[in-house]
């Protein structure tokens, strides 16, 4: 019987699929520094973002056959080295797309109408004067309809963002490293029709995206220690009053340059779900009136976690069935 260590947990639905296939699942949390001592008792390890699987751990565990990442990015795994050593490495690139895209728009709606700051200040509106002052301060919001959203990275999550933007009447500027056209599928409401619409979206140059976007959102992998994708130079190319969203990886946007762009008026707002020093967050970001924050919860919805658990479990079952065959 194959045995899997789900070191960062797994949704109940996924666990049930594995156990029904005769695969033992251990959800005991093993500290990172102790993994090398215990992992040889398992055929595979399943992680999220908390646990890392580096070359040293792979070398220390020759019995390991499979590494699963319950999520999209695999920057916490030495993927190329693991595959070179013959290990199967799998992830769930589609399961959390809807949840991340919805969080992007939660932040965009929040900053467009100043809800993040209003929620900080409304508890102090205990008299008519203060209430009217806040009403005046927050009455210059904007609509998303008719605005342009630049999407850096146009995989599953980027395309989910595009679908929502189209539904809101936004203009879409997608960017991919390979500047090919991308077809995206849009479902109509079931009550209206079962038809689907296929749109072909033309990717634009990075400089055009920076210059023309009212909102910019990042959905790209970002190796730890790499130079920021968005820094001082990129901020200088942006439309004055733009809003930036980072739900990808901390460090993809330089926080130092971000603060400077907020303070000099280049940016109207910033929306951050990930941070350079996570879990620690710069004090200037935590208290900035034009920054909307969330604690790295992009794919953390009940629905996404269930889909992730099911998708990763089905892939694990398929792998071990093929190995037996």
Image: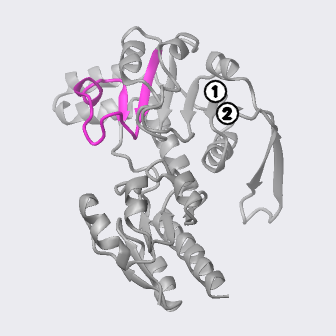
- Cβ–Cβ below 8 Å for labels 1 and 2? yes
Q: From what the image shows, is residue 238 above or below residue 199?
A: above
Determine if residue 274 is in view: yes
Task: Give the total of numbered labels.
Answer: 2
Give the x, y percent position of residue 14: 48, 77
- Label 1 sits on residue: 147
Label 1: state its secondary structure.
loop
How would you rate the neighbour count of disc 1 (Cα within 10 Å): few for under 14, some for 14-19, many for 20 or more? Answer: some
Res 52 → quadrant: bottom left
The residue at 53%/68% (across/down) is: 307
- Which mark sits nearer the N-terminus, 1 or 2? 1
The residues bearing labels 1 and 2 have C-alpha atoms spaced at a distance of 5 Å
On the picture, is 126 further left or further right than 113?
left
On the picture, is 277 further left or further right than 124?
right
Read off the magenta span. 267-292
Which mark identifies residue 170?
2
Q: From what the image shows, is residue 262 above or below residue 54?
A: above
Res 257 → quadrant: top left
The residue at 43%/61% (across/down) is: 58
Determine if residue 54 is in view: no
The verdict on residue 234 being magenta is no
Label 2: state its secondary structure.
loop
Q: From what the image shows, is residue 12 above or below residue 107?
A: below
Q: 200 or 36: which is nearer to us? A: 36
Q: From what the image shows, is residue 322 above or below residue 282?
A: below
Q: Quadrant of the C terminus?
A: bottom right
């Amino acid at each position: 019987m194959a045995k899997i260590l789900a070191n960062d947990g797994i949704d109940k639905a996924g666990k049930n699929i594995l156990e029904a296939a005769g695969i033992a699942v251990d959800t005991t949390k093993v500290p990172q520094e102790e993994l090398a001592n215990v992992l040889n008792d398992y055929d595979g390890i399943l992680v999220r973002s908390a646990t890392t699987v580096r070359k040293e751990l792979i070398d220390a565990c020759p019995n390991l056959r499979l590494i699963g990442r319950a999520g999209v990015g695999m920057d916490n795994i030495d993927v190329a080295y693991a595959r070179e050593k013959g290990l199967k490495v799998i992830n769930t690139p589609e399961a959390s797309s809807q949840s991340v895209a919805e969080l992007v728009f939660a932040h965009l709606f929040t900053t467009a109408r100043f809800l993040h700051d209003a929620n900080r200040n409304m508890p102090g509106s205990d008299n008519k004067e203060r209430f009217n002052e806040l009403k005046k301060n927050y009455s210059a919001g904007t609509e998303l309809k008719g605005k342009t959203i630049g999407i850096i990275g146009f995989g599953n999550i980027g395309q989910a963002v595009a679908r929502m933007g189209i539904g809101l009447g936004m203009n879409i500027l997608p960017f991919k490293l390979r500047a090919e056209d991308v077809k995206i599928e849009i479902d109509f409401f079931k009550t209206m029709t079962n038809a689907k619409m296929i749109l072909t979206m033309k990717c634009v140059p990075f400089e055009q995206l920076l210059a023309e976007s009212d909102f910019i959102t990042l959905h790209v992998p970002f190796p730890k220690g790499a130079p920021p994708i968005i820094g001082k130079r990129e901020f200088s190319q942006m439309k004055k009053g733009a809003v930036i969203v980072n739900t990808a990886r901390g460090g993809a946007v330089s926080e130092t340059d971000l603060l400077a762009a907020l303070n000099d008026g280049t940016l109207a707002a910033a929306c951050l779900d990930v941070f350079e020093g996570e879990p620690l967050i710069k004090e200037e970001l935590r208290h900035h009136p034009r920054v909307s924050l969330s604690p790295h919860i992009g794919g953390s919805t009940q629905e996404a976690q269930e889909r992730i658990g099911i998708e990763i479990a089905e892939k694990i079952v398929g792998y071990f069935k093929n190995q037996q065959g």
